[in-house]
Amino acid sequence: MANSEFNPKSKMEMRDCFFASDGLKLHYAEWGEPDHDETLVLVHGNRDQCRSWDFFISALASRMSRSCHVVAVDLRGHGDSDWSSKDRAYHHQDFVLDLAGLLRHLKKDSITIIGHSLGASMAVLFADSCPSRVRKLVLIEATGPLARKDEDAPKLLAEWLEGDQDQPEGYFYPALEDAARAIKTKFPLIPEEVCLHMARHGTKPTEQGWMWKYDPRLRARSLSTFSDSQIRAFIERIDCPTLLVYGGESDFVGSPRASRMSLFKNGRIVGISGSGHHVPHEEPEELAEIVGNFLWR
């Protein structure tokens, strides 16, 4: 069904769509013609949702010299997608499975993936596992999952077992504007209009007020336990052209993950000054310019 609330500059119409993966009903937003040869799949970060890409998509669409098919997915537990059952945690391989299910649903032989944070990490795992399915990669503020040491595994499992899996989300807001202010307070570099847009699509009304759509269990640390050497092995097998983007005001460059950027055989590294971790939300125009040049020039 078309949604007229957000009108990209390209005047492409947004459609809400669904597909099945691992017994779950998952949501994605779609722009352009599904039968187009070139498809861009956008994958959001942890506790985010697909409509947070709207401003970037609008900026990118205004720079397109040709038509394109754009898909922004809600990973399981996020946005308008189903949550995992209570007896299952959220593993990285589950999110990668969602990407594989999306490609089967779209009937696409290959795609370009643009991922932010968690989404970029899952794009790395998917591109290595299915190299023939990925034309190009755009990785924003991530070079794969956080590495775990062997001694981390017992601690992570204990934390999950000690948590209350039935505890409902405790963050309720009297109005959407209050939820938007919460985003702005935590991430001051995100413009106010973007915060309100994210709150509008990232919350749902309840009798107690507006609450976030994502599964509260996503606040727990992931039980996935890839080691640094395993993650590096994934990266070293990726041959497709890769654009690595980081925010100049984020702490990414000082993190252990930044050292992996040099491992990408066909990688290009770009920093965006004035932006923090949430580059697509904070600097969508500049990001679209950089991504457009990478994809089409």
Image: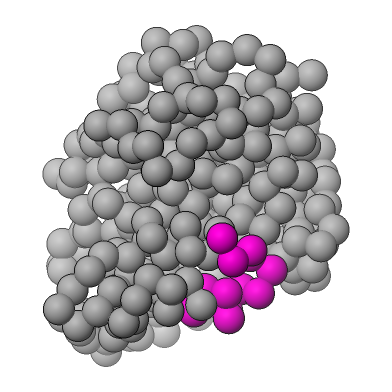
- In the rendered image, the quadrant that contains the N terminus is top left
The stretch drawn in magenta includes residue 53: no
Say if 293 sits above or below 42 in the image: above
Q: Where is residue 50 drawn, in percent x and y?
A: 42, 47
Where residue 248 sits, quadrant-wise, is: bottom right
- Identify which residue is drawn at 42% across, 15% down: 33
Q: Where is residue 28 drawn, in percent x and y?
A: 34, 39
- Identify which residue is drawn at 26% across, 50% down: 81
Say if 13 sits above or below 27 in the image: above
- Identify which residue is drawn at 31% across, 82% down: 174
As drawn, the residue found furthest toward the bottom would be 162
Q: Where are the magenta residues, as a range?
A: 182-193
Residue 142 shows up from this direction? no
Say if 26 sits above or below 297 in the image: below
- In the rendered image, the quadrant that contains the C terminus is top right
Compared across the picture, whether 199 is left or right of 261 comes to: left
Say if 2 sits above or below 277 in the image: above
Viewer-closest of 268 and 63 = 63
Compared across the picture, whether 275 is left or right of 107 comes to: right
Viewer-closest of 214 and 20 = 214
Q: Where is residue 199 drawn, in percent x and y?
A: 42, 65
Q: Where is residue 144 drawn, in percent x and y?
A: 59, 53
